[in-house]
Amino acid sequence: MEVIFKVIRQQENSSPVVQTYLLDAESGNTILDCLNRIKWEQDGTLAFRKNCRNTICGSCAMRINGRSALACKENIGSELARLQQILSLASKASTIPEITVAPLGNMPVIKDLVVDMSSFWNNLEAVAPYVSTAARQVPEREFLQTPLERSQLDQTGNCIMCGACYSECNAREVNPDFVGPHALAKAYRMVADSRDSDTENRLESYNEGTKGVWGCTRCLYCDSVCPMEVAPLEQITKIKQEILTHKQADDSRSIRHRKVLIDLVKEGGWIDERQFGLQVVGNYFRDLKGLLSLAPLGFRMLCRGKFPMSFEPSQGTQQVRLLIESVQQEERLETKN
C-alpha cells in the first residue's frame, strides 16, 4: 500500500519545514524500515539515528504522529490503526494514509530527526546513577544480593535511555531545572539497591526544590510512552514515599502538601481548604511570611463570598479513613519486606 511520510526537517538554529515522501510499504514494515528506504532510495540527506533495530539500544526514538516512540518498534499497520482510532479516519479510507515523523521534544535539533541529548545525559549524571559503596571497606568478595533484593531492580533496570519520556515531559518543558523522569527512574534504582551506601544523601538531593521529585507534574505521559514499561512516574512516587518516611511535615512545603492532604482527607473525607492553606503555606502558623502571602487571596475570597466559614465532613468519611489506613499499612509491610 502507498503511505505518505511527512518528515519534520530542521537544521540547527533554523525553523522546521515539512518534507513529504511517498512510499510503497507493507503493514508489517517498521517506521525505521521506511525511513531507511527513504534515505536509500529517495533522499540521502535525511538524518536520523539508528543502531540495533531490535528495541534494545533506544537510538531511534522520535516523535511518530505526535507521540515519542521507537521507530524500530512501531510498524505501519499498528500506527495507521492507532490513527484511525484517534482521528476517526475510517471514513477517509480512500485517501492515502499519512504518517508524520518529527524529532524528540525538550532537546534542541542538530539536524532533521537528530537531537542534542546533552541535557538528557547531564541530568542523568546529576542523580549519581551508580551504586555507591564509599562508606564501606573494600570487601574480600563481591556484594551479594538475594533474589528478592535483585528483583526490586528489574523494572528500572529495563530502561534503555531512549529519551521518549524526557521528550514528552511537561515538567521539563516548563522547568529547565527539573532533571527529568528518566533520571528519577534511575535514581529509584539506586535507592532500592541493597548494595548502595548513600541512600540518605540521595533522598536529600532528590527532595531539593523542584529539581527533584517534587517538580513532577504527574501528567503520566512518561509512563504512556515508555517502550520498556519502566513506568518512570511510578518510580518517582516511590522516591516520594521514601522521602515522606524519612522527613517531618515541617521540613519543606512539598512534604507538608502531601502529608497535610492525606491527614485532612482522613479527618473529613475531603479537604478543608482553610486548614490546608494554613498548614501547608503557613507551616502550622510558624511561617509568618507564608501566612502573609495568603492574606490577599483570603481577602478576595471573603469579598466575593467564596471563603468557607465552616467545614462539613463528607459522607462516608469513616470508609475513606479506613481505605487510606489500609493502603498505608500495606506500604509499611512492603517496606519491611
Image (cartoon, rainbow, N blue to C red):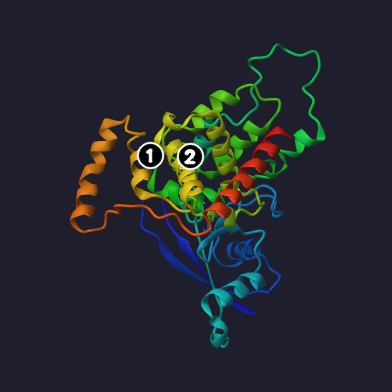
What element does badge 2 sit on?
Answer: helix
Q: Which residue is mark 2?
A: 259
Q: Which residue is mark 1?
A: 280
Q: Position of residue 221 (x, y in %)?
A: 53, 55
- 149 sits left or right of 261 in the view: right
Q: Is residue 179 visible?
A: no
Please state, as top left, top right, bottom left or bottom right, where the C terminus lies in the image. top right
Residue 93 lies in what quarter of the image? bottom right
Point out the residue furthest to the top here: 137
Residue shown at 68%/31% (left/top)? 193
Camera-side residue of 272 and 64: 272
**Label placed on residue 78:** none
Give the crowd class for mark 1: few <14, some 14-19, many >=20 residues within 10 Å.
Answer: many
- 119 sits left or right of 38 in the view: left
Residue shown at 60%/31% (left/top)? 129
Q: Is residue 79 above or below residue 89?
A: above
Camera-side residue of 13 and 276: 276
